Image (cartoon, grey):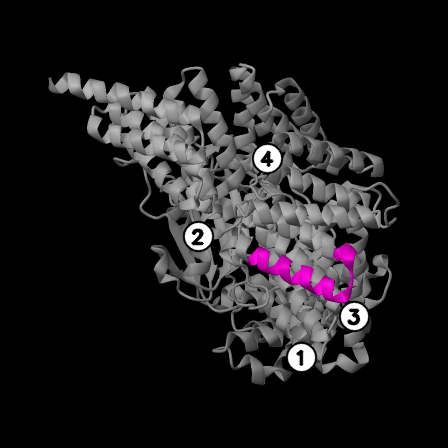
Amino acid sequence: MGAAREGGSTSNTITGGTFFHAVVQGRDITVQLPPAIDRALAGLPAPAPAFTGRDGYVERLLADLAPAAGGADGQRTVRVSVVSGPAGIGKTELAVQTATRALDQPGWFPGGVLFTDLAGYAPERSLSPERALEGLLRALAVPGEHIPGGLEDRQRLYRSVLAAYAREGRRVLVVVDNASTTTQAGPLLPTDGINAALVTSRHTLDGLDARLHDLDTLDTAASLAVLDRALRHARGTDDTRFTDDADAAAVIARLCAGLPLALRIAAAILAAAPSRPASHLAAALRAEHGRLDKLARPDRAVRAAFDLSYQHLTPAQARLFRLLPLNPGPDLATESAAHLSDTGPDQAEETLQQLAEAHLIEPASSWGRWRMHDLVRLYADEHGRTHATPDRRDSARARLFTHYQDTARAADSHLDTLPGPRAPRFPDRAAALRWLDAEHTNLTATANAAAAAAAPGLGDSSPTVSLAFSLARFLALRRSFDDAITLTASALAVCRGLGDRHGEGQALNNLGNALSEVRRFEEAIHAHTQATTLYRELGDRHRESRALNNLGNALSEVRRFEEAIHAHSEAATVLRGLGDRLGEGQALNNLGITLQQVRRFEEAVHAHTAAGAMYRDVGDRYLEATALINLGGALVQLGRFEEAADAQTRAATVFREFGDRHLEGTALNNFGYALQQVGRFEEAIRAHTGAVAIHRELDSRHGEGQALGNLGAALVQVGRLEEAVSAHTRAAAVFLETGDRHGEGKERSNLGVALVQVRRFEEAVHAHARAVTVFRETGDRHREGAALNHLGGALQRARRFEEAIRAYSMAAAVFGELGDRDGEEAALQAWAVTHNELWLRQS
């Protein structure tokens, strides 16, 4: 069974994962593929119409990508192809053109294409493999809040999904653009031997076990063809300026040094000025010949091409271009660009589209968002620093950061579950969440950038603190606890540097909550203890009590129950005296959870009931549901099963309404447990199976373990014993992985019981022996006695009678020490039976 805690902005940690859309993820991967793949969702950029001079490369790459013609195993020799070359050489375009043609081949890639730009050569924007996998999983229709954390989990899920596509005959092409290292690209590549990948890089990535293709510059004929085709595409077939002035075209092609990027920009410059002759453009390029002659340094050639485009921008276009790199994240919304330039959204959108037409920026993944190539970004930033004073660069950055802070606060107001007014910036909670999801990366990057800028005392650190606090609820809801820890730790450092003790206390409290969610309980206890002490020194009894309540949560997780009960009780008493009904309810609800841990169930029912009444009084339906879910757990222990089932059902409905899948899964698991107690085992199995799926979807490993354990118990009741063994085995592994020793001990014991029923006695002995060790080491004497009793039974069934007698004797001794006469008597009776059986065998 699971429990929901509150305090700060978090709920009780549950780790593990499942995906409803395309994927169900966990230790064992099950994939439900959509009926069809919409190629538009793949994000493959449109191929350029002026592509030429690369036919040999395309044919070689297509040969790599073609489906296997046969062979013993039906697998391909070439799994990955890497296209390498200098910046601006056209690696991306070659990959896009090849991928487009491969997709047009019947039966080659019926599963579609995945495309990701790793921005490997821009340190501040480079995508880690974890982030890139997040984007690819989103492309597979996985919602952001359902994507697991950590490279290994994401990689395992991703590759399992691709393998499932392959098994279904829906081969997928993965295009990984702009990778800087094998470490960055390797985790994104399929390993099933059927799906294929194209990788582009400025480096020869010979560590990928791939077919390598080194891309060279275009020759003169191909360069001239690119110029002419690009101009005619933009201006129509009647624009013959390049063919009319062959000498000027040859000069332009030579000075662009065969770089496709430079050639396309040169053609775009001419296209933007219909009356400008090619000779004039050639003269302009000659003026830059000092840079263009240094093509051995590819960035110089690109900069020269950018110079030509930049020089033809209007003052407004040039200023916005120079300001765009101030955004710390990977892309920018039109609205944000308007704040940067201090213009209206319509004017900003018009200017952005003009910059896109000049090939200085490009549309991002969705309409209204824009991104810059990493080299263009560096180029624009250089000019921005040069023009910092006339552009009022510092003011522009301040406007952008203020926009992010204000809008994040407004969005956060819609995540508050208490009734009351909301910021009018968003019409409802759903709209606020959409904005937060879209800007998540920008917001965290802004907070981190502000902290870095303020480190030497030269910048404004307020965005770090503001965003860390405003995003706390959102990051908890989306279970982005790594981001929460990073941001809150930065906010803590800033507050300490400024001497802001109240801010320091809030940061410590939020940090402790996030640390608890990733099961770093000792660190969480330290953070909450510091927060409690700080608020006590400030004389802030209200915040001290709330921090004390959260401290109780962490103490309970490490089984320091008496300290936890004291903390919750003290917090409830103080908050009652202060008239904080909501805070008192949170303390009582958490107190009830801890009381259940020490088997004081009547008191727990009273605490949860009182908490629910307080939440109801203040109108917080969400928190009332947390009281219901916990009340249901206590009612089960008292044998009030129908009431328990009703409480869990009502709680699950509210959590579903608020979009909290984490607690919905917990309620569903608890509902199944209540159903088991009244013998409705098939319904319980369905409930637990659904809970397992939800927790896998969320990468909620601890919750997955709890649901698997309960599922195994229900499967035993209907005689599906091998399935029960599998469920308990997986549950024990989850608890071992997450460091929950008590949970591991329970599941080892349950596994042993199931193994005995399928006559796998030696395995059962091993499972029970492990459970005895765990309970002894964790100090749970009652469960240690029960595990010894089970161990004796398994040894007896394995006909290891002398060892069984010793186990029963030890169990009786433990129960005797605890004063559990029933347990002691049962152990002694088993001892007598076994002793008699041994005597009979020896006589």
Q: Secondary structure at mark 1?
A: helix
Q: Which residue is mark 3?
A: 398
Q: Are marks 2 and 3 in contact (CB under 8 Å)?
A: no
Q: Are marks 4 and 3 in contact (CB under 8 Å)?
A: no
- Quarter of the rendering containing residue 653: top right
Distance of label 2 from label 4 (alpha carbons): 44 Å
Of callouts 2 and 4, which one flags the residue occurring earlier in the amino acid sequence? 2
Distance of label 4 from label 3 (alpha carbons): 51 Å
Amino acid type, label 4: Gln
Q: Would you say residue 453 sits in the magenta stretch?
A: no
Of callouts 2 and 1, which one flags the residue occurring earlier in the amino acid sequence? 2
Image disc number at residue 596: 4
Q: Quadrant of the N terminus?
A: top right
Of callouts 4 and 1, which one flags the residue occurring earlier in the amino acid sequence? 1
Of callouts 4 and 3, which one flags the residue occurring earlier in the amino acid sequence? 3
Image disc number at residue 187: 2
